[in-house]
Image (cartoon, rainbow, N blue to C red):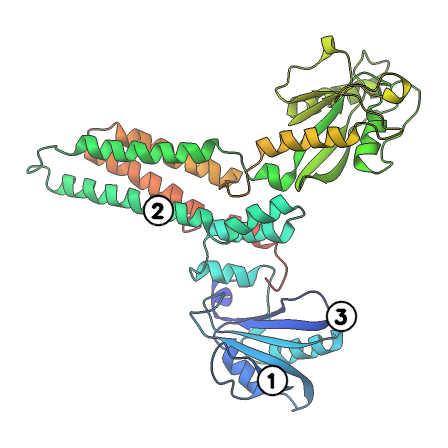
């Protein structure tokens, strides 16, 4: 799709669930959205006023459906363009007939995935952080993911970035004055300017040190580890509620890592079963043991079923006494995959650790892209604060502003946008 096609065409797609359904919402956005609606439904009247209209195919005047039609006039719409919504009956044939009638008109075509949101970004209705938040909201599977994505999609990070950008821009303006009138400046106020820059550095550092959004989106990795026949696979099946791992009395049965997704306390947890840790007896088992060690190194939480002396050095390790149905079942660490003893307590312990390493409900969180760019911005500001030469300091501030613009999607993100909006559905 060329830039001209993207900017000039009017797009149409179903923005509700896939038909059949009781009601379907079909929406159009673009320069001829209003004209197209009037070709099907007659004059619409006032914007943001729902009216019941008879829809007719402009090619032959045949009846399509009766529908509620709503106009959102530019620039006061979700995309910043004229946007029309048709709320019609949700049968497949009805929706297909309506879309066919609309796309029969000049300059109207079916939307690409995420194209409505992309137009909102292009027209300044949202920034890139909000678009990424919308993608995360569409993919959210847990309550914590939903809350975090909703905050991002509603502009929590955009507001912070805008505040920082304005502050950096003000510093840049001061430096430009200092450069233009260098012969008249006495150098007073430089210390204050440096302090203000360092205050921005501190603010950015606080956000950079906070938990990242990936742990919410991808899940906290809880790895079950220990020697062979310690009950790892049985515990994995019991915690996940699925018979995923093979359980036998033969040591070394598990040769590969096995994963299952679950939610604990509204948080996404990726539970991982691993091969028993021992001196391997064959090449295949050695591969499994190597994978187990790799999972332990990358784990957010380790559920350890072995002896204390063999415990991995990990800051978030839960030592568990397994198979307590065969012996003592005292203490919070004793569990039984057979009768369920201690499983609720173990899940609560995993959830408590997970809650400490993911963003809290009201906490602003960055993704990896935003974190890298904000780190670049912070470093540029830190360097600028230590420079006496206004020309060099001004160059650092330009770099800082560019990093902020990249976070917001104002610069250098065309390839990223293509990848991002492929994650959206057609009507979003």
Image quadrant occupied by the C terminus: bottom right
For marks 3 and 1, give the CA distance: 21 Å
Helix, strand or loop status at disc 3: loop
- Who comes first in sequence, dot 3 or dot 1? 3
For marks 1 and 2, give the CA distance: 44 Å
For marks 2 and 3, give the CA distance: 46 Å
Vertical order, 284 against 149 (above or below): above
Callout 2 touching callout 3 (CB < 8 Å): no
- The residue depicted at 30 percent of the width and 41 percent of the height is 398
Image quadrant occupied by the N terminus: bottom right
Residue identifier under label 1: 52
- The residue depicted at 46 percent of the width and 75 percent of the height is 73
In this view, the mark in front (2 or 3): 2
Q: Residue furthest bottom?
A: 61
Residue identifier under label 2: 163
Residue 20 circle label: 3
- Who comes first in sequence, dot 1 or dot 2? 1
Left or right of residue 166: residue 151: right
- Who comes first in sequence, dot 2 or dot 3? 3
Residue 267, horizontal then vertical, whole percent: 65, 40
Helix, strand or loop status at disc 2: helix
Residue 93, horizontal then vertical, whole percent: 75, 77
Q: Is residue 392 visible?
A: no
């Amino acid at each position: 799709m060329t830039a001209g096609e993207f900017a000039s065409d009017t797009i149409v797609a179903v923005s509700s669930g896939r038909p059949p359904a009781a009601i379907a919402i079909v929406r159009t956005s673009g320069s001829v959205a209003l004209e197209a609606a009037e070709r099907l439904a007659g004059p619409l009247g006032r914007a943001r006023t729902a009216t019941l209209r008879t829809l007719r195919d402009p090619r032959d005047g045949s009846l399509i459906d009766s529908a509620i039609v709503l106009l959102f006039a530019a620039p006061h719409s979700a995309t910043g363009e004229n946007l029309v919504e048709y709320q019609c009956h949700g049968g497949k044939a009805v929706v297909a007939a309506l879309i066919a009638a609309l796309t029969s008109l000049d300059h109207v075509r079916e939307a690409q995935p995420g194209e409505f949101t992309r137009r909102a970004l292009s027209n300044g209705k949202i920034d890139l952080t909000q678009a990424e938040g919308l993608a995360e909201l569409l993919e959210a599977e847990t309550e914590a993911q939903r809350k975090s994505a909703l905050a991002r999609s509603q502009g929590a990070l955009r507001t912070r970035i805008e505040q920082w950008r304005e502050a950096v821009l003000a510093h840049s303006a001061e430096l430009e004055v200092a450069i233009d009138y260098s012969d008249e400046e006495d150098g007073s106020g430089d210390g204050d300017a440096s302090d203000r820059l360092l205050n921005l550095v501190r603010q950015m550092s606080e956000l950079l040190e906070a938990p990242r959004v990936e742990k919410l989106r991808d899940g906290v990795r809880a790895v079950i580890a220990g020697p062979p026949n310690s009950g790892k696979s049985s515990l994995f099946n019991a915690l996940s509620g699925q018979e995923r791992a093979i359980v036998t009395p033969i040591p070394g049965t598990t040769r590969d890592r096995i994963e299952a997704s679950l939610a604990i306390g509204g948080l996404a947890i990726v539970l991982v079963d691993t091969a028993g840790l021992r001196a391997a007896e064959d090449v295949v088992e050695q591969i499994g043991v190597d994978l187990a060690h790799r999972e332990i190194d990358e784990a957010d939480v380790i559920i350890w079923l072995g002896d204390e002396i063999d415990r991995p050095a990990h800051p978030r390790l839960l030592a568990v006494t397994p198979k307590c149905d065969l012996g003592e079942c005292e203490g919070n660490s004793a569990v039984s995959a057979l009768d369920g003893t201690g499983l609720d307590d173990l899940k609560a312990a995993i959830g408590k650790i997970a809650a400490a390493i993911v963003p809290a409900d009201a906490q602003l969180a960055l993704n990896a892209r935003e974190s890298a760019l904000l780190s670049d911005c912070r470093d540029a500001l830190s360097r600028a604060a230590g420079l006496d030469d206004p020309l060099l300091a001004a160059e650092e501030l330009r770099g800082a502003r560019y990093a902020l613009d990249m976070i917001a999607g104002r610069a250098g993100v065309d390839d990223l946008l293509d990848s991002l909006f492929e994650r959206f559905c057609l009507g979003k």
